Amino acid sequence: MLQTIPSIQDFKQKIRSFKYNHLTIGFVPTMGALHEGHLSLVRQAKREHNKVVVSIFVNPLQFGVNEDFQKYPRTFERDCELLSKEGVDIVFCPDREEMYPPGFCTAVIINNLEDKLCGKSRPGHFRGVAVAVLKLLNLAQPDNAYFGQKDFQQTVVIKRLVSDLHLDVRIKALPTVRTEEGLALSSRNTYLSELEKKDALCLYKALVKARSMADSGIINVKKVIQEMENIICGYASATIDYISIVNAETLESVTSIEKGDVAVLAVRIGKTRLIDNMLL
Amino acid sequence: MLQTIPSIQDFKQKIRSFKYNHLTIGFVPTMGALHEGHLSLVRQAKREHNKVVVSIFVNPLQFGVNEDFQKYPRTFERDCELLSKEGVDIVFCPDREEMYPPGFCTAVIINNLEDKLCGKSRPGHFRGVAVAVLKLLNLAQPDNAYFGQKDFQQTVVIKRLVSDLHLDVRIKALPTVRTEEGLALSSRNTYLSELEKKDALCLYKALVKARSMADSGIINVKKVIQEMENIICGYASATIDYISIVNAETLESVTSIEKGDVAVLAVRIGKTRLIDNMLL
């Protein structure tokens, strides 16, 4: 039976009882508006643990002042139905006051990683992510925590956080789930019109091009990025935020492609900013 | 038998075995150069737990560029002898590379608290403290961690850190241990000449004056601080860094004294910066 817990105190107590009974915990932190991408994480967590905990918290600290915190899709009841069907044990759903009570003043910064790529166009985003995820990991005390590879930089930031601070948890980044045509699932896809949804395929097409060029032995990054840009510029509603090929750990741009590098990009489709990435 | 462990990997394994056997852990983080103040923490930890862990790590991140990191007293063998006599189980003594390996890039900031008082004259000090203590707490996984009340702002910062990040540990701040004359014990007292040691009593005298004024019903902060300044200015080698009366949680200066407020001060005696405080 799915149990929804909004209170930190109650959540702590529940986790303590799991721990006391030597039950393993798989944890999937989310902002709700769940799709098949989230559910793939939940299913993996379910396969590997006695108990599965999902958090639903639209974290205000990771949204910039002009971003979509207010209009971010909130579908709590539907989310719970979906999670219930998957056999999830607990949905932890604190509100803002519960997570950031008056007097809260701790910030967590992952230097070097937070200002790159998405961090450039979303200043403060990754410290918002970092502090919320750190709090949630400390509360849920999971054996494994699951994140989508779609938010590639996020997974790198969180792995670094966990390693630097010696958290006793394994971070698992699972493959991006896509529509049949290749669009990476994202809660923000609901912002797209039908026409924009078609244009949004340009991210995937550019990434597939990059991979096929890399596969064919091309290591010149400029050449590859030029081809990716050409593809995206063919779509009227698309504006490039960034395209880069980076080292998978440092997120530094590489100048010649090696196996294990990652092509990453952010593109605005109309007013909606989408991100995607692919291992080369 | 005291065991000294410099490796994080070995330390983790040891802690895991304690946890597995349901042993409680009391933890005293130190920078070594131990004195009776530290030992009072160790004894309290010993009374309250199955296992006592002490860390000795002179944390470079909490020293400013022109501060005394290089000359900070290091007395490792003597420290271990003292701790062995107290029945301590483990001394965790990582080196700098072990704590901050290449690639380490996480910073922890306790906003509002870190820039006040000592934070003003030691910029960056408390984020250095915060990240090291957070790492150590995550590694040692203690039931209780012990700190000296002498470093009052540090105890406030760490309590806030623990509360904001939901660490599963109680922070205990134990009373300052003093010489018979009243000088607060500090590893930095070894920097003082015999003459300076006498002058260093001015901190205690000023605090005692503040408390006696508060006890007699005086609530005017300006008046109290003026008297404290008068006392300290009577000592040739003393230069005031700050004197303040603050709320014990927010560290905000108060304008009229209430029970529970704390008189705090930092004074240079010659070249040595000393701090002390007293509950009013």
Image (spheres, coloured by chain):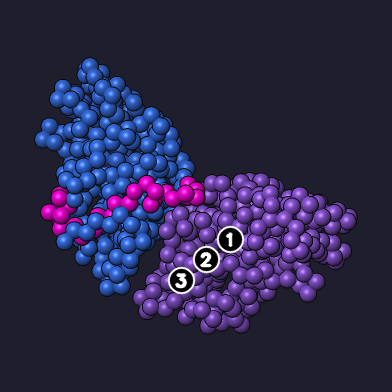
Chain colours: A purple, B blue
B198 left or right of A6? left
Please state which amino acid type lies under the numbered disc 2.
Ile
Residue span colored magenta: B81-107
The percent position of residue A210, horizontal first and vertical second, equals 76, 60
Q: Nearer the viewer, residue A267 or B180?
A: A267
Marks 2/1 in contact by CB < 8 Å: the verdict is: yes
Chain where mark 2 sits? A
A16 left or right of B260? right
Marks 2/3 in contact by CB < 8 Å: the verdict is: no
Helix, strand or loop at disc 1? helix
Q: Earlier in the sequence, mark 2 or mark 1?
A: 1
The percent position of residue B128, horizontal first and vertical second, equals 41, 43
Please state which amino acid type lies under the numbered disc 1.
Thr
- How far apart in space, not on screen, are marks 1 and 3 (Cα)? 16 Å
Helix, strand or loop at disc 2? strand
Identity of the residue drawn at 18% across and 58% down:
B2
Which residue position is annotated with label 3? A143
Chain where mark 1 sits? A
Q: Nearer the viewer, residue A173 or A46?
A: A173
Identity of the residue drawn at 33% across and 46% down:
B155
Res A171 label:
2
Magenta run includes residue B99 = yes
